[in-house]
Amino acid sequence: MIKLNRRLALSALLAACVGGSTTALADMKALEEAARKEGQVTWYVASIDARNAEAAGRAFTAKYGPKVNVVRAPSQVMFQRLTQDLSQNARNADVFSSVDVGNFVTLKEQGALMAYKPENATRLLPAFQGLDKDGMFHSTVASVIIIAYNKEKMKADEAPQNWTNLLDAKWIGKIALGHPAFSGFAGNWAAQMNKLYGKSFLQRLEKQKPQVGRSLFDAVNLVSSGERLVTAAPIAPILENADKGKPLAVVYPTDGSILVATPSAVLKNAPHPNGAKLFMEFLLGPEFGGILVKARYEAMRADVKPLPGAKSVTEIKTVRPTIEETTKGIPQVAESWRDVFGQ
Amino acid sequence: MSRAPPHRRGDPCGRPRAGTRPAPIEPHRQLRSFDPTTLLWWALVAILVILVVHPLARLVIGSLVDPRTGAFTLANFAAAYGRTRYLVAFGNSLVMGLAVTALCTAVAVPMAWAVSRTDMPGKTLVRILTLGAFITPPYLGALAWILLAGPNAGWLNTAYRAITGADSGLLDIFTFPGLVFIIAIYSYPYLFVFVTAALETVSSEMEDASAILGAAKWRTTLHITLPLALPAILGGAIITFLEAIALFGSPAMIAIPARYNVVTTQMLEFFSYPVRVEVAQAYALPLLAVTVALYLLQQHLIGRRGHVTMTGKGGERRTIALGRWRWIALGGCLFVCTLSVILPFIVIAQAAFAKSWNRGFQHGNFTLDNFIVILFERQATLQSMVNTFWFAAAAASLALGLALAIAYIVHRKLMPWGGVLSFLCLAPFVVPGIVLAIGFYAAYAAWPFALYGTAAIMILAFATRFLPIAYANSAAAIRGINPEMEEAVRILGGGRLTAIRRVVVPLLRRSLIGAWLLVFIPATRELSTAIFLYGPDTRVMSVMLLNLADEGALEAAAALGLVLLVAILVIVLAGYSLLGRDFMVRRSE
C-alpha cells in the first residue's frame, strides 16, 4: 500500500514537472487513481449553461468516479468569485472555464494558474491550439456569435442581415442582449462592435431600447418566448433550443460572425490538483466534445463530428478577436456600456 | 418581512421599556453568592460583539481606511460618490422608496380600514391573502410578474392583444413604474398590519361623538378615525420605505433590464472585479444613516401616541355599515390580492409544470421535467434546498437562544447594563441586509477568522439579521411571566438555572415556537445577505433561484420557487395549527 502511494506521488510529481506532452498512458492511469482518491472536483464555469455543465459533470463522474461540483454564473460574475476566493486564500475552485480570455491573462499575471499542459491539448484542431504560449490555458469550448430571431413572429427576409441592421428603427424595443459587464459572450460581441463600428454604435444601440439580461442565455430565452424578436448570441444555445422545437432561426451576419474560443485552466492552488488535471483532460477529450456538439458548440477535435444543420466555421465569414483585443476591449466596453445604458 | 415583527406586541416600540434601569448590585453581594449567570452574561456580551458590534464597526472603519496601507483616508468616499452614475443610483433608490411607500399607503390604509372597521364580507379571506403576500419572497413575485407582464410575451399582454387586437402589449414590467409596482405589492402587508392593529383599538364612541355632533359617516372617518391611526400609518410607511430601499432581489431581476440603477445593484457592481469592499463600505454608510434616522423618526411617531385611544373602559367597536359599497370594497381588496398572490401563484405553478411558460395551459405543454432538473440533474439545487433549511434552523435557534437569555437577564434585572444588551439585540433592525453582509464579509471572510464561503458565516449573518425579531418576541414573552413563580423555586432551594429549566421554559414553550418560526421563515428566503456571503458549497435556494432566472431558465426557477413556497406554506400552516390563527400577522394583547 505504502509502495503504491509513493509510486502515485512520484508519478503525479512527474506529470506536474514534465508536463502533459510526455504523459504516457501509465501516468494517465496514475492520475485517474489519484483523482479518485481526492473524490471531487469543483468547476467554476461560465462558458456553457448550467444544465450542460451538470451533464458534463455527471459524464466525468461516470467515467472516472470523482464527483463534480458545478458552480455556474456569467463569466465576469464567476471571475469575480474566483478572484475573491484567491484574495481570501479560500481554495474552492479546481478548474475555471470562462468566455473572457482576458480573465486568464489576468490570472496568469497574478501567478494563479497551474502550468499544466494536458495531453489532450495536442489533439485539438490546429485552429484551437496554442492559445497561451506557456500552455497555462487552453481552448475548451467554442461558438460563433450570430444574429438569431424568432421565426414564428417574423419571416426570414425580414431579419437583420448584418450587425448594423440592428440599429434600424424597426428594431426599437425588439432586441434582447446580454450585459458585457456580466456575460463573456456579450463582452466579446460588444468589444468587436466597438472596434468595427466605433463608439457611436453603443450610443445608437441604446436608442433601440434593447432588453439587457445578465446572461446571454436569458436573451436567447427572451427571443424564443417571443418577448423580444432578435438577439446577438452564440449560435450554440440557439440551435440547441431550435432542436428542442423552440422557434429560433439563425442569420450569419454578412459583416462576419464572431468566433469565440473560450478557455479553461487549472488553478495553481486547486484543492484537488489531480482531479483538476484529470478534469482538464476531460474538457479537451472526446466525451466532452460529444456533449458540446450535442449542445451545438463547435467541434474542436477531428474525432468529434458536428450534428448536421449548422454551417462549419470554415464555410462562413468570421471575425476572431485576438487575446489583446479582448483583454483590453471587454473592460473598456463594459464601463462605457454602463455609462451609456445607465446600468 | 424581517422588519415588521418586532412591532407586533403591546409595546409599540418593540423594545424594552427605556425607563427600567437595572437596580445597582452591590459588589460584595455579588462575590458572596457567585451566580453562574455572571459567566453567562459575559458569554452573551461576547456573542453580541461577534454578531453585531464587530461587523458594524468594521463597516465604519473599513470605509475610512486605505486597504493597502491601512492609513486613514477619505478616498473611498470620493470613489463611492465621485461618479454621476453612483449618485444617480442613490437618488433612484430614494425616489423608488418614496413611490413604493405612496402606493402602499394608498392601497393598504383603505384595505386595513375596510377589514377592521366595516361590515365588508370576506374579511378573513382578505387577511389570509394578505398573509400570502407577506410570506411570498419578493424575488419570486418579481419572477411571476416577468411572466405576467413581460412587455411582449407576458400572459396579461398576450391576453390583452388577443382581446383588443392591438399591436403592442399594455404593460411593461421592465420599467420604473413596473419596479415600483412589483415591490409595492409585496410590501403593503407591513402597513396593513400596522394600520389594522391601530384601527382595532379605536373605540366607536369617538366616532359616535362625531356622529352626534352631526358629522356624516365619511367625514367622521376622515376627521376622527384616520387621524387616530395616523401614527401607525406613518410608522408603517417608514418601515415600508426602509424595506423597499434595502431590497436586492427585485431590483436585480427588474432594474437591470429596465436599466434603472439603484443602491443595491450598485453595491453589486462594487463587488465585481476588482472587488472594492472599502468603496462598498463607504457607499453603504449614507444608506445606513438614512435608515437609522428614519427609524428614530418612526419610533418617535409611534411612541408619542398623541391620542388616548385605550381608555380601559372596554369601548364598544361597532362595524360601519357600508351598504352596497361593501361589495365594491371587497372587490378592491380582492383586486390587490389578485395582483400580489392569486395571479403570481397561478403563473408560478403553471411555469413549474410547463415545457414553455408562454404556451399557457395548452395540451402537451405539461411536464415534470423542471422538477427532475432541480431535484436530480442539478446537484447544486438539491444541495441548496438542504442548505436553506438547515441554515435557517440553525440561525433561528441561535438567534432565539441568545435573545431569550438576554431578554431574561434584562427583564429580571439580573445584571447591570441590560439596556445596552437589549439595544445591541435590536440594532441590526436598522441595517439593510446587503450592508450587514458587507460588514460580515469585511469582519469574518479573511484571516484570522477565514469564514469566507463557510456555512458558519451564513448562519451567523442570518442569526444577526433576524435577532431583533427573536428579541422582541422573547422580551414580550418574558414580560408575561410573573417572577414570583421562579422565586418560589429559589425559596425551595433550586438555583436560577433550575428555575429557568423547570418553570420559565415550559411556560414559554408556545411563544418560543412562534418566535422560532418567525425567524425561521424569513431566514429560508433571505437573499440580500446571502448573495455576498455564499460559497460554492453554501448556496441557498434564493441564490439558486436568482441564478436560474439570470440564465433564462424561468421554468426551472419557477419549479424551485414553488418548492420554496410550498415549504413556507406548510410551515406557516403548522404554526397555525400549533399556535392559533394570529401567530404571524398580529398578536394584539
Image (spheres, coloured by chain):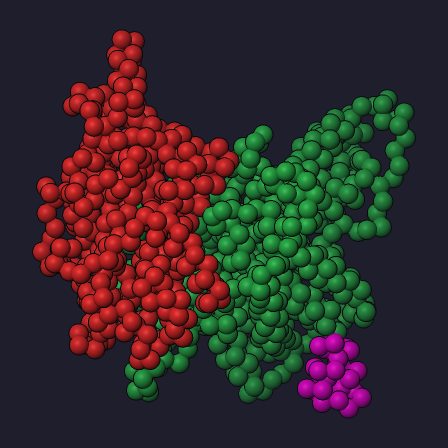
Chain colours: A red, B green
Horizontal and vertical percent for residue B488?
78, 34
Horizontal and vertical percent for residue B517?
55, 48
Horizontal and vertical percent for residue B245?
59, 62
Q: Quadrant of the C terminus of chain B?
A: bottom right
Magenta highlight on residue B423: no
The residue at the point 58 percent across, 30 percent down is: B448
The residue at the point 73 percent across, 69 percent down is: B231
Location of residue A267 with respect to B311 vertically, above or below: above
| Residue B295 showing in the rendered view | no
Q: Quadrant of the N terminus of chain B?
A: bottom right
Q: Which residues are magenta?
A: B204-227
| Nearer to me, B339 or B556 | B556
The residue at the point 79 percent across, 51 percent down is: B17
Horizontal and vertical percent for residue B461?
57, 43
| Nearer to me, A55 or A142 | A142
| Nearer to me, A20 or A272 | A20
Quadrant of res B416: top right
Prevailing secondary structure of the magenta residues: helix
Count of marks overlaid on the render? 0
Magenta highlight on residue B211: yes
Please indicate whether residue A288 sits to the left or right of residue B304 in the image: left
The residue at the point 75 percent across, 80 percent down is: B224
Please indicate whether residue A164 sits to the left or right of residue B383 in the image: left
| Residue B212 showing in the rendered view | yes
Please indicate whether residue B472 sits to the left or right of residue A61 in the image: right
